[in-house]
Image (cartoon, rainbow, N blue to C red):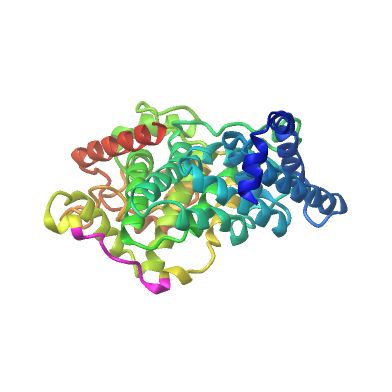
């Protein structure tokens, strides 16, 4: 049948007719967007989902005829998989998505940012609640299948992981603001909601990826470690001790940028907390925080025979049976409540990110975790952190400047390669 179609399309009259049909692709993609903007289980949503499935079938025919433009189709199919109100629509879109990325695997990573922005706007219009999206594996099943079956084990998966984690890292560092979605225009909801949903989508996809090797987990932990060391550790240092940072702390509490360019916003706080939460979530499923220390130390030891073979291991079977990431919704709700107060946001970072975390570059050096510092000033009264929790976070906050420079170099290389 495929050979017959290929020969028929070469005929001038049929080729001209097929090319005319191809101009319908934007309208068909718009049907997918419209179906994802409606609240699930409503009569309008059921009807729109049925029409969207027919639109996917028409796009499938365009693909067989060779007139489908994948550069615009792949982002739309990705956002449909992520935001579809019905499982059968997500399944149909995922099936076509898999066929397209098999022909052009690079489109999976390059289309991710636009798809996340589009899907978050659609979920906002559909009235999605925080935490529910990340707990639905069917939204991420097609992307996970493409990750496993299409991308090659090292290069392709590594590039995809780099792009995916960079989406959340860029939000946390403010390197690239979340692109606005046309779906959110005219929406009476707070502008913060679609951005938080975008963070949830990224975190949900990362947590649902079918990771198989320690090399994949190690790449995620290294990206998170660099981000937290550069953008979160200085804020925690300011809040706990180091009176020389007093002016920087006051600037943060006033909502302004620090002298080093770090600014605390609801979105950057959310992304930072999600990055730290995802790392703890993965490490717990893989057997404990010791794996983070080992993988990060293996990264520092690359070039030696020990470092080169440190990650050539499969993750334990229990890792694939990990529980759903329930912490995502909790973080999003707390951040939304604290959004109007930079002091409250800083309190959340102090509450959930310990200063002796193994994810901070240089925190595992001998003597750093053992040395304690006393707070030289009290935090502003409107930052509520339980004394017991604060006492566990009073490890010495003056991290080695050499390791901070190493983390900054790693972050710059990561963002540059992701942008390329």
Q: Is residue 301 left or right of residue 126?
A: left
Asked if residue 311 lies in the magenta stretch, the reply is: yes
Q: Where's residue 373, x and y in %?
A: 25, 50
| Front-lying residue, 26 or 416 | 26
Position of 131 relative to 258 (above/below):
below
Regarding residue 195, the answer to whether it shows in the image is no
Q: Is residue 301 left or right of residue 207?
A: left
- Residue positioned 30% across, 59% down in the render: 292
| Front-lying residue, 191 or 35 | 35
Main structural element of the magenta stretch: helix, strand or loop? loop
Q: Quadrant of residue 416?
A: top left
- Residue positioned 23% across, 36% down in the render: 405
| Front-lying residue, 86 or 129 | 86
Magenta-drawn segment: 309-318
Q: Where's residue 160, x and y in %?
A: 43, 46
- Residue positioned 32% across, 55% down in the render: 218
Q: Where's residue 34, x and y in %?
A: 76, 41
| Front-lying residue, 347 or 119 | 119
Asked if residue 110 lies in the magenta stretch, the reply is: no
The C terminus lies in which quarter of the figure? top left
- Residue positioned 31% across, 56% down in the render: 215
Q: Is residue 44 left or right of residue 94?
A: right
Q: Is residue 5 left or right of residue 361?
A: right
Q: Residue furthest right?
A: 43
Position of 221 relative to 289 (above/below):
above
Regarding residue 323, the answer to whether it shows in the image is yes
Q: Quadrant of residue 400?
A: top left
How many discs appear?
Answer: 0
Q: Where's residue 332, x and y in %?
A: 58, 50
């Amino acid at each position: 049948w495929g050979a017959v179609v290929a020969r028929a399309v070469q005929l001038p009259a049929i080729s001209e007719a097929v090319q005319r049909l191809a101009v319908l692709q934007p309208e068909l993609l718009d049907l997918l967007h419209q179906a994802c903007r409606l609240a699930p289980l409503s009569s309008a949503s059921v009807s729109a989902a049925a029409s969207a499935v027919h639109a996917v079938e028409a796009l499938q025919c365009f693909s067989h005829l060779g007139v489908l433009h994948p550069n615009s189709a792949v982002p739309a199919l990705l956002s449909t998989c992520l935001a579809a109100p019905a499982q059968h629509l997500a399944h149909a879109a995922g099936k076509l998505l898999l066929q397209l990325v098999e022909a052009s695997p690079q489109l999976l990573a390059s289309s991710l940012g636009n798809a996340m922005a589009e899907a978050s706007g659609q979920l906002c219009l559909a009235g999605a609640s925080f935490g529910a999206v990340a707990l639905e594996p069917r939204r991420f099943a097609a992307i996970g299948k493409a990750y496993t079956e299409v991308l090659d084990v090292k290069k392709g998966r590594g590039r995809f992981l780099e792009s995916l984690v960079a989406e959340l890292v860029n939000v946390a560092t403010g390197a690239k603001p979340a692109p606005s979605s046309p779906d959110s225009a005219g929406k009476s909801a707070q502008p913060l909601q679609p951005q938080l949903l975008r963070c949830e989508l990224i975190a949900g996809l990362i947590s649902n990826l079918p990771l198989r090797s320690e090399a994949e987990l190690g790449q995620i932990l290294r990206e998170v470690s660099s981000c937290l060391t550069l953008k979160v550790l200085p804020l925690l240092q300011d809040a706990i001790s180091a009176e020389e940072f007093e002016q920087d702390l006051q600037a943060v509490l006033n909502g302004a940028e620090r002298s080093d360019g770090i600014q605390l916003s609801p979105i950057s706080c959310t992304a930072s907390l999600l990055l730290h939460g995802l790392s703890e979530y993965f490490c717990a499923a893989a057997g404990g925080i010791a794996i983070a220390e080992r993988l990060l130390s293996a990264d520092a030891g690359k070039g030696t025979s020990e470092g080169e073979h440190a990650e050539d291991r499969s993750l334990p079977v229990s890792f694939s049976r990990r529980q759903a990431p329930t912490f995502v919704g909790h973080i999003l709700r707390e951040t939304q409540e604290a959004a109007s107060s930079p002091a409250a946001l800083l309190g959340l970072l102090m509450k959930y990110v310990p200063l002796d975390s193994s994810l901070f570059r240089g925190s595992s050096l001998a003597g750093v975790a053992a040395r304690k510092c006393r707070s030289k000033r009290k935090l502003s009264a409107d930052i509520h952190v339980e004394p017991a929790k604060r006492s566990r976070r009073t490890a010495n906050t003056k991290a080695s400047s050499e390791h901070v420079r190493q983390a900054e170099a790693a972050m710059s290389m990561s963002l540059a390669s992701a942008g390329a």
